[in-house]
Image (cartoon, coloured by chain):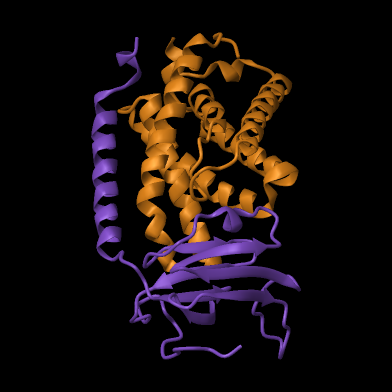
Chain colours: A purple, B orange
C-alpha cells in the first residue's frame, strides 16, 4: 500500500527539486560570511546603516510625514533593533504578528529580520555594503 | 476508485455534475470550513523556524478538492479559506501572502495533475514548494528587498517536506472517502 502512493515521475520531480535546492544552498553559502554592516530599510528606503561591531540600540519609527514623504505606513509605528555582541535582533515591535521579534538573532552576511507589516528590513551586509540591490549607493551613514 | 484520477471537464463527468447546485455549494462550504479549521489549528502551533516554514495541513483538503472536483473548486475553497483565516486570525498580511502562495501553488498543481504523470503526493509536494515560493516573491516585493531570497533554499526544502507529508495524508484519506462526497 505504501508504494502505491508514489509514481516514478514523483521521484524525478523530487530529485530535480533537491538539485535546485542544493544549488541554491551553495549559492547562498558562498556569499555568506560574517557581515560588518547592519542596514535598516523602511519600505525600500535606507533608514540607517550601522556597524555590527558597535553595541547599540536603534529605534526605527515611521510616521514622520514631512513634505509628504512616505517613510512608513501607519503613523507612529515602532521597531527596536538591538546590535549586541556582533548579533542583531529585534527586541520589540508594535506589529500584530511579532514574527520579527521572535526571529533568532542574526549575524551573517545576507541574513535579515523583516517586519512585514511595518515594511522594515534589517539586513546584514559585508564591508562593501554596495551591491546590486542597493539602489541608493554612496551613503556610508545617514544621520537621523 | 476511478474518482482518484478523475478527469477534468474535458473527460468523463465527475460525480459532482450529478448533484444539484445547492448540494454542491453545501459540500464546498463544508470543505472550506474544514480547511479553515486546519488553518486555525496550525495558527495555534507556535511557528518554530523562520516565517514561511509551516506544515500547511489545510492543503490536505485543497489537494483532495483538486482531485475530487477540479481546479476551480479547489481555488474557490482555498481562496475563501485564506480570506476567512485572514479576517479571523492571521491578519491582512498573512492572508495576502498566503493568497499569493495559494495561487501559484494551485496553478502548478493543476498543471502537473493534467499531465497524469505524478501521484497526488507528488503534485502536493510541488504545491508545497510553489506555495512557499509565491510567499517569498510577495514578501520580496513588499519589503522591496531582493536579498530576501537568502531564505529560498530553506523554504524550498521545507516546502518539499510539508508538501510530501500533506500529499501522503491526502492520498490515504482520499482512498477512504465515499464515492458520493
Q: Quadrant of residue B117?
A: top left
As rendered, which of B69 and A58 lies closer to the eye?
Answer: A58
Quarter of the image where the C terminus of chain A is located? bottom right
For the question of whether residue B176 can be seen, the reply is yes
Quarter holding residue A63? bottom right
Asked if one can make out residue B6 in the rendered structure from this viewpoint, the answer is: no
- Residue at the image position 73 percent from the left and 84 percent from the top: A65
Residue B121: x, y in percent?
Answer: 39, 26
Q: Is residue B71 above or below residue B140?
A: above
Q: How many marks?
A: 0
Residue at position x 58%, y 47% from top?
B99
> Taking A69 as reference, is B141 left or right?
left
Choose between B112 and B86: the one closer to the eye: B86
Quarter of the figure with residue A66: bottom right
- Above or below, comparing residue A65 to residue A58 in the picture: below
Describe residue B45's horizontal placement relative to residue A84 as left or right.
right
Report the side of B122 relative to B91 (left or right).
left
The residue that appears at 63% across and 74% down in the rendered structure is A60
Residue at 31% from the left image edge and 64% from the top image edge: A32
In this view, the residue in front, A76 or B137, is A76
Q: Quadrant of the N terminus of chain A?
A: top left
Depth check, front residue: A37 or A25: A37
Vertical order, A139 against B104 (above or below) = below
Amino acid at each position: 500500500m505504501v508504494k502505491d502512493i508514489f509514481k516514478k515521475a514523483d521521484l524525478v520531480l523530487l530529485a530535480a527539486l533537491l538539485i535546485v535546492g542544493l544549488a541554491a544552498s551553495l549559492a547562498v553559502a558562498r556569499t555568506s560570511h560574517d557581515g560588518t554592516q547592519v542596514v535598516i530599510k523602511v519600505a525600500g528606503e535606507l533608514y540607517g546603516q550601522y556597524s555590527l561591531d558597535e553595541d547599540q540600540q536603534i529605534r526605527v519609527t515611521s510616521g514622520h510625514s514631512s513634505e509628504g514623504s512616505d517613510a512608513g505606513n501607519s503613523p507612529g509605528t515602532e521597531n527596536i533593533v538591538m546590535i549586541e555582541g556582533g548579533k542583531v535582533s529585534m527586541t520589540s515591535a508594535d506589529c500584530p504578528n511579532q514574527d520579527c521579534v521572535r526571529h533568532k538573532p542574526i549575524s551573517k552576511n545576507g541574513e535579515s529580520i523583516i517586519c512585514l507589516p511595518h515594511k522594515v528590513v534589517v539586513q546584514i551586509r559585508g564591508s562593501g555594503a554596495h551591491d546590486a540591490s542597493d539602489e541608493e549607493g554612496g551613503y556610508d551613514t545617514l544621520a537621523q | 476508485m476511478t474518482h482518484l484520477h478523475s478527469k477534468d471537464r474535458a473527460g468523463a463527468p465527475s460525480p459532482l455534475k450529478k448533484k444539484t447546485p445547492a448540494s454542491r455549494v453545501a459540500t464546498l462550504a463544508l470543505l472550506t470550513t474544514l480547511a479553515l479549521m486546519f488553518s486555525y489549528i496550525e495558527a495555534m502551533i507556535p511557528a518554530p523556524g523562520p516565517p514561511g516554514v509551516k506544515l500547511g495541513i489545510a492543503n490536505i483538503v485543497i489537494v483532495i478538492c483538486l482531485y475530487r472536483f477540479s481546479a476551480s473548486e479547489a481555488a474557490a475553497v482555498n481562496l475563501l479559506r485564506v480570506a476567512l483565516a485572514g479576517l479571523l486570525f492571521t491578519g491582512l498580511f498573512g492572508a495576502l501572502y498566503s493568497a499569493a502562495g495559494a495561487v501559484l501553488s494551485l496553478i502548478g498543481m493543476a498543471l502537473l495533475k493534467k499531465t497524469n504523470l505524478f501521484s497526488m503526493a507528488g503534485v502536493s509536494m510541488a504545491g508545497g514548494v510553489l506555495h512557499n515560493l509565491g510567499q517569498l516573491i510577495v514578501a520580496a516585493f513588499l519589503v522591496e528587498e531582493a536579498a530576501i531570497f537568502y531564505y529560498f533554499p530553506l523554504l524550498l526544502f521545507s516546502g518539499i517536506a510539508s508538501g510530501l507529508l500533506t500529499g501522503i495524508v491526502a492520498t490515504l484519506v482520499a482512498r477512504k472517502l465515499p464515492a458520493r462526497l
